[in-house]
Each structure stands twice: as structure tokens, then as C-alpha cells.
Amino acid sequence: MKTKKLIYSLVLIFIVFQSCTELEDRSYTNIIAEQFQPTGDDLGALLAAAYIPWRQTMLKGSGVFLVQMLPADQDVIPARPNGWVDGGVYKRMHQHTWTTEDAMCLQPWERTYVGVNACNRVLYQIESGQIDIPEQKDAVVSELKVLRASYYYILVDLYGNVPIVDKFDVPAGYLPEQNTRKEVYEFIIKEITENIDNLSEEVNTEYYGRFNKWAAYSLLSKMYLNSEIFSDGNYSEFQKCIDACDKVINSAKYELESKQSSVFITENENSKEIIFALPLDATYVTDWDAFDFHMRSLQPENQATYNFQSTPWGGNCCIPQYINTFDPDDARYADCFIKGQQYSSSGDSLFCTMGAGAGSPLNYMNEVPSIDNSQEYHGYRWSKFEYAMGIANRLSNDWPLFRYADILLMKAESLLRLGKADEAATLVTQVRARNFKSNPAKAIVTGAQLMEGSCYDYGRRDNLVPATHEGGADIKYGRFLDELGWEFTQESRRRQDMIRFGAFTTKSWFSHDKSASYRNLYPIPENALRTNSNLKQNPGY
């Protein structure tokens, strides 16, 4: 049993139960603290209330994981025999034609601000003296401020120009002013750097799924790595990224797993590579779409492969051009994708049951006709996260938001951008080594290779229009972008990486044409504009 998950989930049950009983038929505009007088013994529950929105904004339907993955060059949801058109939302995401009213533009905004508000609420309760924790106050306040900064990391990445709300006790009718992206970047950096020294250095079950000092340095590294983008070109902080990464490296608290797949198993809470995770356990986290990669990606017939309790829906798959970038000897190619003929758990061959392919073998091929048309057998499916036998419609794998491989590659990218390609290559080789054990020579990368372009064969590749050929040789440091694509597939980050390398709106792939540069940001959701007259829409929308 996942003890730490049990505790985390019981905390959630405690909060939900209390909310359903104490707050029933009461005004939700009143400060929660007026109705609930917590003590230091309730600290764990209050902290959990501030952390839980991270899981929800990341993994629930229309969440951050989809808005980072679907508009990029690795993943797609094509029309299937059983649907997956859904009013064209997935096509709009793929083709960069999303609107201000799309749920995928709204849900990350609303759910992330729920997290900001939860942090502000608990900070108010502590700083006003309603929670008396004199021995823990400084550390807990700092932890909550760094956690709040992590929510703003989502907001500055996706939307850029967002309101900074750092108070809970605001007057009735308060409408926050909109801040510039540069101001939001500076706020996040200030919150992390001013509070990081107060955080725990412990790596144990108590701090699993919480911001200790090393998780905060990981967040800081991520901010510095993206500084030019997040600050609208006002900062370039690659040396600071290296310095922050070195804090984690020199702590000697983390290391690479001998196999990458070990990071993503169901019982992955003991992984020595995970720095900060979003804990999940399907027994206690009961949102129907809490973490449903298996349901989203596998065809209904694959229920018999894993003896799932529910029938998968069969939508998401990988873009063939992306799959073609892999070296077949790379262990990540074998471990991260489901391909070929499918079988039941007893070894019987599975067959398609829908569409033009009905009756043919369910044999996943690296081919997808277009965003508008596909059969059950088209496209390789996701399998980076282990799909345990007999599970329900929710995975119990913890989501590794920051892991040690990312620290090594953030440092490597920063070195590369500072002209130290050979030093960067040493770190990239270190990460690659575990994936080429049968042919160690293939793991070795040189600085000169990292200076090359991408091997991704960009251009339109569907049956809607004639094929185009753009290649990837013109992408500066494109080989490094390839390395990120191979290491972090299915980890909800490809959009961010492509933007940093200048490829997100400048390249075509599958059924997607080049788009306008303003699409590097999502629009301020229409619902937010309607309810706050201080907000102005991002340029271009």
C-alpha cells in the first residue's frame, strides 16, 4: 500500500467531508476562516488543500497536460470510428485555431487560480493568527509561497499577462489588475528566491509531494531556463539556471534510475529520480478523469489486454513523424509506445470492431491518414506510464513533475546556449546511457552534434493536402530539441520546449500548418474577460 498516498488522500476526504457539512447552504463569498477555526494539528489538511489543485489542473480533462501536448508535434487526437470529434476542439488544438471560448483555454486558467486562492487562504489563516504554529510558521509560510509561485509558473507559461493575486482578505467586488508577463516572471523569481532557504532539505515521506528546497530549486531552474520567453525578452538567465541545477546535483539527494521506465511504474513513489511528484492513488482520488492516459489512448479491445475494469475510449496516438525520429535501439522507443499486434491477457489475438477496419487485426501501425480520419489500428499509443493489470479508469502512478533527468538536461541546455557544447554533451550522454545498454556507443553525443539541427522531418503529412518537406536542419540546437523529445515524451512539456527552440509556430507537421507567432500564448478565456473588466485580451485574439 502507498502509505504516503493514503495519508494524502485521507486528507482530501477530510477536507471534502468538512466542506460538505460545515459550508452547506452558506455564502461562498465569506472567508472560510470565519467558519472553521483550525489548529496546528490541522496543518496537514490545510496544506493538502493548497496542493490538490496542482493534480487537478494538470491531469483532469481539458487540463494542462493536453494543452501542452496536443498543439505540439508529438501527439494528436484524430477522428475515430467511435467519435473523438467533439465539436472540432482537438482539431483546433492541433491546427492552432483554438478560440477564447474553448474549454482547454478556460480550464487551466480556472483550476490554477483555484490553487492560487487556496494558498492565499491558508497564508491568511496563518499570518492572521487563526492558525497558531509558532515553531513551524516561517517554514510553512515559505512553502506556501513557493507553491503559489508554482501555480504562477503555469499561468505565465500558458497565458503570460495575468493578474498577480497574493491576498485572500480582499474587499467585496474586488477585481484584480492585470500584470505584464515580465512582472509575473519577476514575481515568481522573487517568491522562490526569498523563501527557498526556509524550506526543508529532507527527502522523505513527510515531504513527498511537497516543496522541499530541492523541488524549489527545480522550479527555479525551469523559470531561468525559460527566462527569455517568460519575461518577454527582458532576461536571459542561463547561468542562473546552471547554478540552480547545481544546487540539486550537489545535494546528492537524487540520481538517475538505471531504467527510465522505473520512474513511471505504478508504485513509483520510491523512485530516486523523482524530485517533486503529484501523488495519486485510484482508491482515494476518485475524480473520474483524475489520470486516464490508458482510457484516452487505447482502443476498447485493449480492455482484454489488461483486464481493465472499464472499456478504453481509443483517441490519443503519436504523430508518425515524431515516432520516425527514434533510434530503434533506444529503450525509450520500446518502453514508451504500444505498437504492433494486440493480444488479450490470455494470448488471444485482438481484432477491430468498428469502422472500415472492423474484423481486421488490431495491429497498431505508425501511420495516421489525417486529423479528420483514422481507424482503430492507426497510430502508436501511449505507454510511458505503466498500465497495471485490472485497474479502473484512473491510474495510480504518481506524476513526476520534476525529475533528476530534467535537472541534468536543463543544465546541459543552458551550457549549450552559453557556448559550452562539449560540457553539455557530457550530461546528455549521461542521460542517454541507460537507454542504449545493448549498444553503448550510440549513447555518446558530441558537442558538435548538439549544435546541429533537428532530425524531425517537418512538413504536412496527411491525405488532406500534398506533402510538404521542411525538415528540421534550420532549428538552432535542434538536436537538443530532439533529445528533449525522446526523454520527455508524454510528460506534458512539448509545447513549452518547442516555443523555446522557436519551432512551435514556424513548422508544419501532420495536419498542422505554420501558425502566427501570437499562438505561442493562449488567449485570456472569454469567461475571465466577462467577469473582470480589468483584463485585456492577449494580442492577436
Image: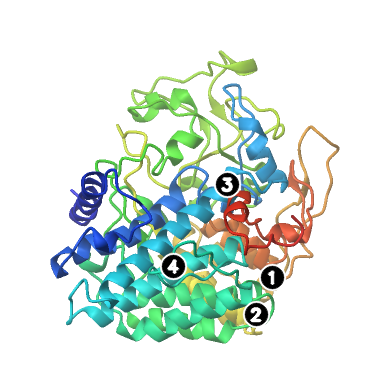
Distance in Å between CA atoms under marks 2 and 1: 8 Å
User: Which residue carries the number 1 mark?
Assistant: 477
Image spot of residue 287 (x, y percent): 35, 40
Image spot of residue 466 (x, y percent): 86, 38
Mark found first going from the N terminus, 2 or 1: 2
Image spot of residue 80 (x, y percent): 61, 26
Q: Are marks 3 and 2 in contact (CB under 8 Å)?
A: no
Q: Are marks 2 and 1 in contact (CB under 8 Å)?
A: yes
Distance in Å between CA atoms under marks 1 and 3: 30 Å
User: Which residue carries the number 4 mark?
Assistant: 171
In the structure shown, which secondary structural element does the residue marked by tag 2 occupy? helix
* Foreground of the two, 286 or 327: 286
Q: What is the tally of numbered marks visible in this picture?
A: 4
In the rendered structure, the answer to whether residue 376 lies left or right of residue 350 reads: right
Q: Residue at x 49, y 65 (%)?
A: 174
Q: Can the viewer see residue 20?
A: yes
Q: Are marks 4 and 3 in contact (CB under 8 Å)?
A: no
Q: Residue at x 29, y 77 (%)?
A: 127
Q: Quadrant of residue 523?
A: bottom right
User: Which residue carries the number 3 mark?
Assistant: 104
